[in-house]
Amino acid sequence: MYPIVHIPANIPGFPEQIGTKEKFWLLGIDGYKYLYKIGRPGTGENWAEIVSYEICRLLCLPHAEYSLATWRDTCGVITRSFVPDGHSLYLGNDIMSKFVHEYDANKRYKQTQYTIGRVFHFLNNEIIQYPIGFPSAFTTNQALSCFVGYILLDALIANQDRHHENWGLILNPEGKAYLAPTFDHASSLGRNESDRKRTTILTTKDMRQHITAYVTKARTPFYTKQTEKSTLTTINALEWIGSKAPDALHYWTNRLNTIKKQQLLTIFSNIDRNWINDNAINFSLAMLALNTQRINKLAETIK
């Protein structure tokens, strides 16, 4: 079973302003900074974050590390800061606001200036290196190739929250830039659906409501053009960026295909049943299987 970190009730901390969930930083006995994020009750955010993290490990995708945690009467996840001492983190909204005229850095959703093309062109830069501390399989386009993996992950887990504060760069004291590891995946795997709705989606004969239709509806915050009214679906975002970086797409697709069903079953079985139930597990496994098929089908069309 995955361990649960019990944070002392009186531990000193300071609030984190980014995002919509209650969270705070604290200093561990090992001297590292940790962020505790309180999961909203009944939303499945905590188990979704843990499952996504474990899938990142299987993919060998650079990622933040997460553990289940409690503090006082709350349940959440805890993650160690991935920003080394003396380094600085710049999130996507800060980056976009510096390179896109009149970009609203505070508008997280329905931000039509947040196009996948702009992110692609920014990261398609040899100066930006692979995330710190993770071995790279790429000899060129390090940051972009890694980011393709992030978009494939989003398509796999139906992560709908890759907004402009959920990616970034890390700069070392000399100003050298690295892509940040992927982080914050709690809005995935249909974690917010009720058990009753999950059962209906899995068993209905109405193909418009079936799980095969459900997985096609996950949307990213990315637009293709500022004039578009709708954002890209997760698979369309992967298609867009994968067609521009096919070698990276095929690399991450091959990594995905090394993951066995038993490995996924092990991830879910290692989560305490006070945090997740069988209904959510079965639903998540069905989503992962279908999205794996969809990613492979897409990759076959891109050479």
Image (cartoon, rainbow, N blue to C red):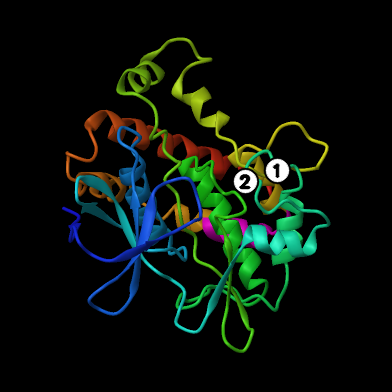
Task: Give the dominant element type of the magenta stretch: helix, strand or loop.
Answer: helix
Task: Give whichever of 261, 178 is nearer the camera.
Answer: 178
The answer to whether one can see residue 231 in this image is: yes
Between the C-alphas of marks 1 and 2, the distance is: 6 Å
The image quarter in which residue 39 lies: top left
- The residue at the point 37 percent across, 59 percent down is 24
249 part of magenta stretch: yes
Q: Are marks 1 and 2 in contact (CB under 8 Å)?
A: yes
Q: Badge 1, how many Cα within 10 Å: few under 14, some, many 20+?
A: some
- The residue at the point 78 percent across, 63 percent down is 99
The image quarter in which residue 251 lies: bottom right
- The residue at the point 50 percent across, 14 percent down is 207
Q: 212 above or below 222?
A: above
Name the residue tied to disc 2: 108
- The residue at the point 59 percent across, 60 percent down is 147
Name the secondary structure under disc 1: loop
Say which mark, if any, is on residue 156. none
Name the residue tied to disc 1: 111
Tag 1: residue type?
Gln
Q: 88 above or below 117?
A: below
Magenta span? 244-252
163 part of magenta stretch: no
